[in-house]
Image (cartoon, grey):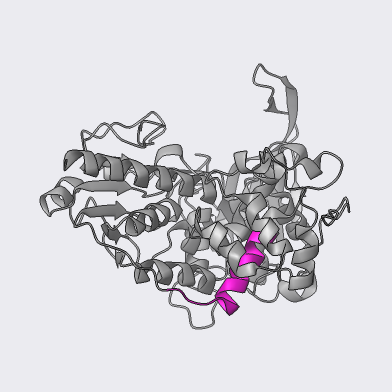
Amino acid sequence: MPELPNLKKEKNPMPVQSPKKRIKNFDEVALGYDEKTAIDEAKRCLNCVNMPCVSGCPVKIHIPEFIKKVKEMDFEGAYQVLQKSSMLSAVCGRVCPQERQCEQKCVRGINGEPVGIGRLERFVADWHNQFGKKRKTKITKNGHKVAIIGSGPSGLACASDLAFLGYDVTIFEALHKAGGVLLYGIPEFRLPKHILNQQIQALEKLGVKIQTNIVVGKVFTIEELFQNGFEAVFIGSGAGLPRFMNILGESLNGVYSANEFLTRSNLMRAYEKNATTPIMKGGTYAVVGGGNVAMDAARTAVRLNAKKVYVIYRRSEEELPARKEEVEHAKEEGIEFLFLTNPIEILGYQNKNDLKDPKNGFVKSIKCQKMELTEADESGRRKPVPIKNSEFELDVDSVIMAIGTSPNPLIKESTKKLKINDHGGIVVNEKTCATNLKGVFAGGDAVTGAATVISAMGAGKLAAKSIDEFIQKKNK
């Protein structure tokens, strides 16, 4: 007789560091399931025949199959199922918004909480990294070279799939370390860097070469890559161009883009005592925005001994785009949310005197106004509009703008014939990731603007398939 499923309505809770302890360190907040908890959570899965959860996964992981293996205590088998679709399971299990993807489709979510798919993915990947047997992968090289620009999630996924197919793959990374947004954008307390490094080392063991400090478009162009024997190029250069509000005072000292702030902390470890890159520690911060990047910036500021941190968001809490878990953690860490609030000016001082010209000096305060939401438009979204005579000032020492990013412009500037849309994204065929240039493919944030890790990986995998078909067809 088959074992009955676990019918508990709630997920097994994730063990975490206490708020009082974690705000004093950069260690990972979520501690992960143990074996007993993972098996119990896996038993909540109904193993649906039509597998709705898989339809919510951009890389189409066979979710019921890997969870069934967990239920059977075959953790290595579960890992091998994950590996068929994703080489970044330890990363995705930590940072993907499962509640809006696979878990949103889970049948158990109709009358309770969905199965903790992300938590189980993380458990399986961590178990493998600690206890799994290292298998040697035998790959037959096919003699064809592919160049990948950018070592973020789309570039890593594309490189992995092409390497397994036998291609000689070289990744060109602009920064001095590989990982892209996974490295510079996501704090240590959400994604420990040794986890990311393990994934990158696994890729190098497949024969993928990674060249850092190479800015394609400056060191050499895409055209020159073809001249050097590469038969196809994948552009996964991300969306690293920060957006600002274009309000008065944004050039004051103490105003950061979230990109700069997080890069200084995550990549350059500015929080360490003898760090060579400066970053403000202590004082009062205002973080403008409501996405995951805003949460990361605000929670990093707390760990840099901030006296007070505000998150300023122009819509209501219901519209907040950040992951629910991250918002809850932020609130537990003492961060104050100012909803229906929008900045209109950043005020500064110089030598303790108020400035007439806010292009110099330091942040003194941020001037905001209260907002209200209109009736929903045709798209179903309510628009925030200012309330008259509702302006107020917040005394702050630093402002972090976390209102989004645009695709990096260097590639399009150095590749004039490459087709770009009005938002700065590379135009591609959605079914193949092919650009208008022969042999050039693109995916991830360079195409869509800032999006999720797993959607970028999905684009990288699709591009790898298309690149293989393109090269094989060309060489027939």
Q: For this view, does 469 lie left or right of residue 344?
A: left
The part of the image, by quadrant, that contains residue 367 is: top right
Figure check: 436 above or below 194: above
Left or right of 394 in this view: 441: left
Dominant secondary structure (helix, strand or loop) of the stretch shown in magenta: helix
Q: Image point 82% across, 61% down: which residue? A: 12
Q: Quadrant of the C terminus?
A: top left
Q: Quadrant of the N terminus?
A: bottom right
Q: Nearer the viewer, residue 261 or 317?
A: 317
Is 84 situated above or below 409? below
Number of labelled discs? 0
Percent from the top left, x then y, of residue 135?
A: 45, 73
Residue 190 visible within the image: no
Front residue of 219 and 31: 31
Q: Position of residue 465 (x, y in %)?
A: 36, 44
Using the rendered view, name the quadrant where residue 204 is placed. bottom left
x and y percentages locating residue 278 in the rendered image: 48, 71
Q: Is residue 298 found left or right of 436 in the rendered image?
A: right
* Residue 126 forms part of the magenta stretch: yes
Magenta-tinted stretch: 120-135
Q: Closer to the camera, 403 or 193?
A: 193
Inspect this view and state whether residue 29 appears.
yes
Would you identify the image quadrant in which residue 177 lies? bottom left
Residue shown at 81%/63% (left/top)?
A: 40
Q: Is residue 468 magenta?
A: no
Residue that lies at the very extreme toward the top in this rendered image: 378
Residue at 52% of width from left, 77% of height from top? 133
Residue 405, x across and y down, in percent: 48, 44
> For the view shown, which residue lies furthest in the front direction?
1
Where 229 falls versus 308 (above or below)?
Answer: above
Residue extending farthest to the left is 227
